[in-house]
Image (cartoon, grey):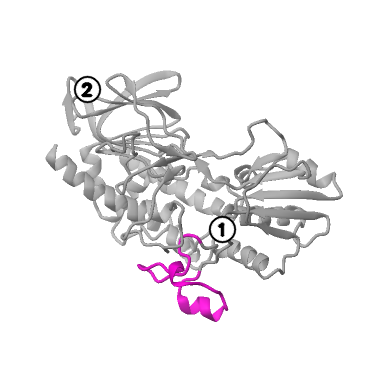
């Protein structure tokens, strides 16, 4: 085989992608948009994915609409890209076009992403220098003395090893929970938004009144309220009362200062993104979440009380919904036989401005990247973002554009030196 190279009779890929979901596959999406996919596959790419489908991840499991216009989710398409040619051939372009100015169902987006993922899988398999391993679980990564990475994974009960010059690790986040005592009053928003919960069904159908705490005032909190209302008509019902706990006020997103002013929304200079001039670009509620949050702020929803204090368990609550996002799912990484300790704060893996995980000694490792759920990506001059935002940024658009471009340019410089 004519792959990137052979070291001690081992096939060495240019890149190993651990986790072929929306974050991991963003690198291939970017290559295709730049017209470089065939070239990069010739250099050698190996994708290791735990499910039987690339790109879609858990998207189609969500029973809610996207928190952005559909156009942003397909902005990566370019006129001459292989993916665009595939979509034209399969007559899917018109469907995508219909999503541009609406917030489409995440299930529908997931189905489309799955089809694109299947196409990209065929592109990978057709290149003799690249490979895909599906239904495979990454277990360990070793940094070798010769400057290579060895990835150990299991597929169908067999342990396998592959090597590469650089590695991307995006294995999906783990729902963050407050519940350490297996109290069945606690449920993470992930399970409300992705599946039918029998305990929840029984709770809402067999009780005349419920006192509910929602911990975290993120997009998922607004989606939870919307989903519960869809199922059980909870909003403005005297049967249900909600306490919404959050560190900061609910914020609304506006595409311009003019739109915010026309809507009578109060904001400051610190809420404006200096790159895009959008108001609350990263912290603001969008689409359906915008409508729910605005109704809470305007008090047209009368059974949700905002709590600007840290949540403390209260026996009075019948249900406690955790909208706390995800913590990192980084697997063990070894060097010289010793496991590397990375900087993890409140479950979030710290990374530098090039998306390289930061070790306890505050150093990072060249050509080793992580940027999906449960990873801390901070604001920079390039990413933009309002000064008032203190969290971490993520999202499909960021992976496909901002992250992928920075990693591609950095790899060129690093691998030239190597």
* Label at residue 248: 1
Is residue 304 visible to the viewer in this orientation of the structure? yes
Q: Nearer the viewer, residue 4 or 276?
A: 276
Q: Is residue 158 magenta?
A: no
Secondary structure at numbered mark 2: strand
Q: Residues within 10 Å of mark 2 (few under 14, many from 20)?
A: few
Residue 76 percent location from the top left of the image? 36, 57
- Rounded to the nearest whole Å, what is the CA distance between mark 1 and mark 2? 52 Å
Q: Which residue is mark 2?
A: 10
Residue sticking out furthest to the right: 208
Q: Quadrant of the N terminus?
A: top left
Q: Which residues are magenta?
A: 254-283
Query: Is 345 situated left or right of 13 in this image?
Result: right
Q: Nearer the viewer, residue 81 or 173?
A: 173
Total number of numbered discs in the rendering: 2
By secondary structure, the bulk of the magenta-drawn segment is best described as: loop
Q: Is residue 260 magenta?
A: yes
């Amino acid at each position: 085989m004519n792959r990137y190279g052979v070291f001690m009779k081992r096939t060495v890929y240019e890149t190993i992608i651990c986790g072929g979901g929306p974050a991991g596959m963003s690198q291939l999406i970017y290559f295709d948009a730049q017209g470089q996919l065939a070239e990069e596959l010739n250099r050698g790419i190996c994708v290791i994915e735990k499910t039987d489908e690339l790109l879609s991840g858990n998207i189609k499991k969500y029973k809610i609409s996207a928190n952005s216009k559909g156009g942003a989710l397909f902005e990566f398409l370019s006129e001459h890209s292989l993916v665009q040619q595939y979509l034209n051939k399969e007559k899917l372009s018109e469907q995508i076009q219909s999503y541009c100015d609406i917030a489409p169902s995440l299930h529908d987006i997931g189905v489309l992403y799955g089809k694109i993922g299947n196409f990209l899988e065929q592109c990978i398999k057709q290149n003799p220098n690249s490979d895909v391993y599906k239904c495979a679980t990454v277990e360990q990564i070793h940094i070798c003395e010769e400057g290579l990475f060895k990835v150990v994974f299991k597929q169908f009960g067999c342990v396998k090893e592959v090597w590469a010059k650089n590695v991307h690790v995006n294995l999906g986040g783990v729902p963050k929970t407050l519940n350490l005592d297996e109290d069945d009053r606690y449920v993470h928003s992930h399970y409300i938004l992705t599946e039918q919960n029998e305990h929840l069904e029984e709770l809402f159908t067999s009780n005349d009144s419920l006192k509910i705490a929602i911990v975290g005032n993120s997009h998922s909190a607004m989606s939870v309220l919307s989903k519960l209302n869809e199922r059980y008509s909870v909003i403005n019902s005297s049967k249900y009362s909600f306490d919404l706990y959050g560190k900061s006020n609910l914020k609304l997103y506006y595409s311009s200062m003019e739109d915010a002013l026309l809507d009578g929304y109060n904001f400051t200079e610190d809420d404006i993104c200096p790159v895009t001039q959008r108001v609350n670009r990263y912290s603001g509620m969008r689409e359906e979440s915008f409508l729910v949050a605005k109704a809470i702020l305007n008090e047209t929803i009368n059974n949700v009380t905002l709590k600007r204090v840290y949540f403390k368990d209260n026996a009075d609550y019948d249900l406690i919904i955790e909208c706390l996002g995800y913590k990192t799912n980084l697997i063990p990484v070894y060097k010289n036989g010793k496991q590397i300790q990375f900087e993890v704060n409140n479950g979030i893996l710290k990374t530098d401005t090039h998306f390289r995980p930061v070790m306890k000694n505050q150093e990072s490792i060249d050509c080793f990247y992580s940027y999906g759920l449960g990873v801390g990506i901070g604001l920079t001059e390039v990413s933009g973002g309002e000064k008032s935002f203190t969290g971490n940024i993520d999202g499909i658009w960021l992976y496909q554009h901002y992250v992928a471009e920075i990693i591609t340019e950095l790899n060129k410089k690093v691998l030239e030196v190597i």
